[in-house]
Amino acid sequence: MTEPVLPRRAGVAPLAPLPADFRAFHQMYRPAYVRWAELYLGNREHAEEAVDHAFEQLAADWAEALRVDSPAGFAWAAFKRHIVETARARGRRPVVMDTAAFETEALHNAVDPIGELEESLSLYQAISELPERQHDVIVLRYCIGYSTEETADILGLTVPGVRSTARYARHRLKETLGIEPTEGGERSQREEVGEL
């Protein structure tokens, strides 16, 4: 296995060898960060470039990241700030609603694609209005498709914390969309969100 090397921007001094724990972190989290960034930047190449720049900054701040209780949480916050700044610098607004709405399997198989599209757009607009942590959990869990455990790991949260956050987010989405609580007992999280 070769050592990951972060790309260098022109005029930037060569990086010192990266610590093993940073290399492992980079290898483990870069795919999730790229998937998230692609949703927001609307382009895979731009996403990869922005994530690589975010990891360059994280490499410089790695000692600080290791001093906090949750290095993954520290990195996620820094990463998100960088993606938002990148989107603004490119004159873009987040495109997660547009991308996700057109990629839903339900839309492709719908009897009424226009009705399905309207519902999808309403859902993604409601997701965009969630508080930040709820938004992150819902996008990672249901838009991208990570498990509860993977979502907790990416965000630097506990598994019960992700479950609780998802539960509150789903409740808030149902209220926003005017969906009545389901009768007949508990259903899986994926079924509930899938019905929103």
Image: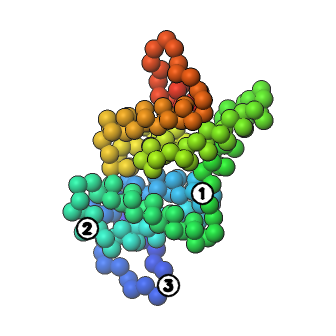
| Kind of element beneath mark 1 | loop
Q: Is residue 143 left or right of residue 101?
A: left
Looking at this view, name the residue that lies furthest to the top.
184
* 18 to 47, vertically: above or below: below
Q: Residue at x 47, y 28 (%)?
A: 189
Q: Which residue is mark 3?
A: 10
Location of residue 70 in the rendering, given as x and y in whole percent from the top left corner = 27, 54
- Residue at the disc numbered 2: 64
Q: Name the image quarter holding the N terminus.
A: bottom left
Residue 184 lies left or right of residue 88; in this view the side is left
Q: Nearer the viewer, residue 187 or 9?
A: 187
* Residue 56 location, quadrant: bottom left
Residue at 33% x, 54% y is 73
Q: Which is more foreground, mark 3 or mark 2?
A: 2
Q: Amino acid at mark 3?
A: Ala
Tags 3 and 2 touching, CB below 8 Å: no
**For the point 39% across and 63% down, which residue is it?**
78
Residue farthest toward the bottom in the current orientation of the protein: 11
Dot 1 or dot 3, earlier in sequence: 3
Q: Nearer the viewer, mark 1 or mark 3?
A: 1
Q: Secondary structure at mark 3?
A: loop
The numbered dot on residue 94 is 1
**Figure coloring:** rainbow
Q: Which mark is residue 66?
A: none
